[in-house]
Amino acid sequence: MCPVRELKKIVEDVYYIPGRTNVGVIVRDDWCILVDTGLDEDQGRRIVNIVRDAGLKIKYIFNTHSHADHVGGNSIILDRSGAIIIAPSIESYFIENPVLEPIFLYGSYPPESLREKFFMAKPSKVDRVISEGVDGELDLTYVALPGHSFNMYGLVAGDVFFIGDALFPENLIEKFGVLYHFNVRDTVKTLYKLREAKHRYYVPCHFEPASDIGKVVEVNLDSIKKVRKIIEEHTVSKISMEELFSIILSRFKLELSPQMYFLYSSALKSYISWLVDERVIDGRFEDGRLYLFRVE
Ligand SMILES: [Zn+2]
C-alpha cells in the first residue's frame, strides 16, 4: 500500500493519519506540524515514513496531552527529524518524566507492570510550553480543553479543530463504561464549550473527524451523568469506597487487570472529588475503612 494514501485530507494543508490514535498533519510549505504521535515507536516510525513519502519534513510536534498513546512516537520521530516539541505546561513535566504517569495513577512507586508502554512512553524534551491564544509564527490557535488530563490543549488550524481526547465515541464509551477524566467537573465545562463551538471540522484522537459533534458531546455528557447517578444512589447509606468502586465496575461488567484497576480507580476518585466539593457526599474513616455517604 502506498503510504501517502494514509495521509487523509481534511481541508487544504490539513491532514490526519488514521490510527488507534489519529495524528494530525498541518502542512506549511515543505514542512509540517504533527498533532500527537501515537502509542509507540511502531506508530512513530509509520508516521515518519508517511510524512517523508509525502515530501514533508517534520518541523514541530504538538502534544495535546501527556498520555502515552499521544506521545509514544515522540522519541523516535525526534531521533529522525530533530523536531521541536510544543506542549501544555503540566503535560510537559509528564512528557519529559514519563514515570510520573504510573506514579500518579498508582499513588506511589509503581510495580513493573505499570511501567510499560501503555502507561509510560519514552521520555522526550519539550522545547516550547504554550498558553491559550494565537501562535502568530505558526498561524495556529491553542485552546485549553481541561478535564481529561492535567491541562490538555486543542489546536485550531484554519477550519480544523484538533480536540485531543476531549470527546470519545459511543462504541468506546460502551466498551470502557467509565472514561478516564482527571477532573470530571472540568470535563463537563469543556463539553459545554464544545457544544457551543463553531468550527468546520473537528479531529478527535479516537474516532473519525466530523463536522457535527453535537450528538457525541451529548453521549459523553450522558456517560458522566450515568456514573454520577450510580454514586449518588449508592451513597444514600454509608458505603466503603472499595465497595462503591466494586459496584460501579461490576455494573459495567468490567473484568480488569490490576493495572487497569488503578486507572479506573483514579478515574472514579475524580468523581468522588467532584461530589465532595459540591457537598453532595462526604467521607468518614471508620473500622479501618473510608466510608462515603450522602450529605442531607
Ligand atoms: Zn488521553
Image (spheres, rainbow, N blue to C red):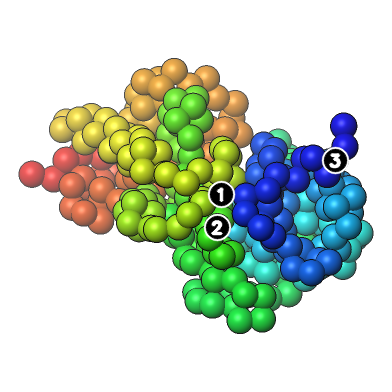
Circle 1 residues within 10 Å: few <14, some 14–19, many ≥20: many
Q: Are marks 2 and 1 in contact (CB under 8 Å)?
A: yes
Q: Which mark is residue 3?
A: 3
Task: Say what amino acid the circle numbered 2 marks.
Answer: Val
Circle 3 residues within 10 Å: few <14, some 14–19, many ≥20: some
Distance of mark 2 from mark 3, alpha carbons? 23 Å
- The quadrant the C terminus occupies is top left
Q: Is residue 287 visible?
A: no
Tell me if 271 is positioned left or right of 45 in this view: left
Residue at (51, 50) in percent of width and height = 202
Tag in front: 2 or 1: 2
Q: Is residue 149 above or below residue 220?
A: below
SS for dot 2:
strand
- Say which residue label 1 marks: 203
Q: Nearer the viewer, residue 132 or 121?
A: 132
Tell me if 23 is positioned left or right of 135 in this view: right
Q: Is residue 8 visible?
A: yes
Q: Is mark 2 within 8 Å of ligand 1?
A: no
Query: Quarter-wise, where is residue 155 in the image?
Result: bottom right
Q: Nearer the viewer, residue 23 or 275?
A: 23
Q: Earlier in the sequence, mark 1 or mark 3?
A: 3
Q: Earlier in the sequence, mark 2 or mark 3?
A: 3
- Say which residue label 2 marks: 160
Q: Earlier in the sequence, mark 2 or mark 1?
A: 2
Distance of mark 2 from mark 1, alpha carbons? 7 Å
Task: Say what amino acid the circle numbered 3 marks.
Answer: Pro
Circle 2 residues within 10 Å: few <14, some 14–19, many ≥20: many
Q: Is mark 3 within 8 Å of ligand 1?
A: no
SS for dot 1:
strand
